[in-house]
Amino acid sequence: MRLRIGSRGSQLALWQANHIAGRLRERGNEVEIQVIHTTGDKILDVALAKVGAKGMFTKEIEEALAAEQIDLAVHSLKDLPTELAEDFAIGAIPAREDPRDALCSADYAAVEKLPPHAKVGTSSLRREAQLRAIRPDLVIHPLRGNVDTRLRKLESGEYEAIILALSGLRRLGKTELVRQIMPIELMCPAAGQGALAIEIRSADLDVRSALIFLDNEAARSETECERMLLKKLGGGCQVPIGANAKFRGGALHLEAVVASPDGKTILRDSGEGEDAIALGALVGGRLLKKGGGAILEKVYAHAGPQPEQP
């Protein structure tokens, strides 16, 4: 089968697209990759929470999918809005990489070891809020660009540390500056972090069939649970919400956080269950009742919820 994959042009996005292309070629498919530049790739000088375009890393790719210029798209799952238009579906969620965040630094071994008022780079409101809760003295600065650009800024001394998704660093083989893999209880990851999503046209049964072998049941259940929690809390990704679901002894265990951007209020909840969607909705509902709704209303009033970059 001839398959055209749509992908963003960043180094990590292309690694992800080539990884999926390789798996599909192993099954005898003829595969090509088309690079599509998205809004999020073009706006690099503004913190993501301040940019007002929903689906900023997916919109142009979905337009190409709808126009049948490509047959499937490979995304970081956390870039995908929690609700897809009915024309689209997630055809497969492959086995997931470690979802945790990593502290990268040239000189310091952990968040607790950073000097007073150290400069830390991140453009994620989720990471910023949780960092402020641990270390209110830290000076948080926006950090955009691809993984190489961010690491270069760290190495040149612009920051004492930066926070990145461990999954992206591992996929690119750039773990030299990872000093701390941050525990979930310290830094709850973004919903879907570490997972890839292969988006297709809902009606394209041939492509759906070609992707079935890539779908990982555990990864799909975990991420469906996390994304349901996110949806229950308002659906945005560039908001101070963390969610991590993991199978333990046959049941799904969900840890979730809603934080005020200044880190002064951290609401936590967790739960266990066998139904991923029901568990996500349950824990999300409890966080709303605990005061999460009030926190998020303020966040949404200042900026539209946006996806964060991997």
Image (cartoon, rainbow, N blue to C red):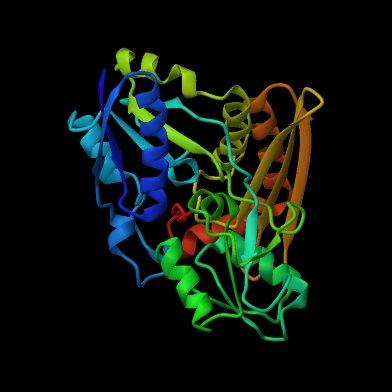
Q: Quadrant of residue 51?
A: bottom left
Task: Answer with left or right where residue 207 lies relative to residue 172.
Answer: left
Q: Is residue 143 visible?
A: no
Q: Quadrant of the N terminus?
A: top left
Which of 89 and 72 lies nearest the eye of the viewer? Answer: 72
Viewer-closest of 178 and 279: 178
Residue 123 x, y percent position in the rendering: 50, 66
Which residue occupies 25% across, 32% down? Answer: 65
Up-down relation of residue 71 to residue 18 (above or below): above
Location of residue 46 with respect to 224 vertically, above or below: below
User: In the rendered image of this protein, does residue 45 appear above or below residue 164?
Assistant: below
Q: Is residue 33 visible?
A: yes
**Percent x, y of residue 159:** 55, 80
The total number of labels drawn is 0
The residue sitting at 48% across, 18% down in the picture is 213
User: Splitting the image into 4 quarters, where does residue 40 fall?
Assistant: bottom left
Pinpoint residue 124: horizontal percent, then vertical percent.
Answer: 53, 62
Q: Position of residue 190 (x, y in %)?
A: 58, 49
Q: Is residue 160 left or right of residue 112?
A: left
Choose top left, top right, bottom left or bottom right for residue 27.
top left
Q: Residue at x 37, y 17 (%)?
A: 210
Would residue 174 appear left or right of 42 to someone viewing this image? right
Q: Residue furthest right?
A: 249
Whether 303 is drawn above or below 262: the answer is: above
Residue at image position (45%, 35%) is 197
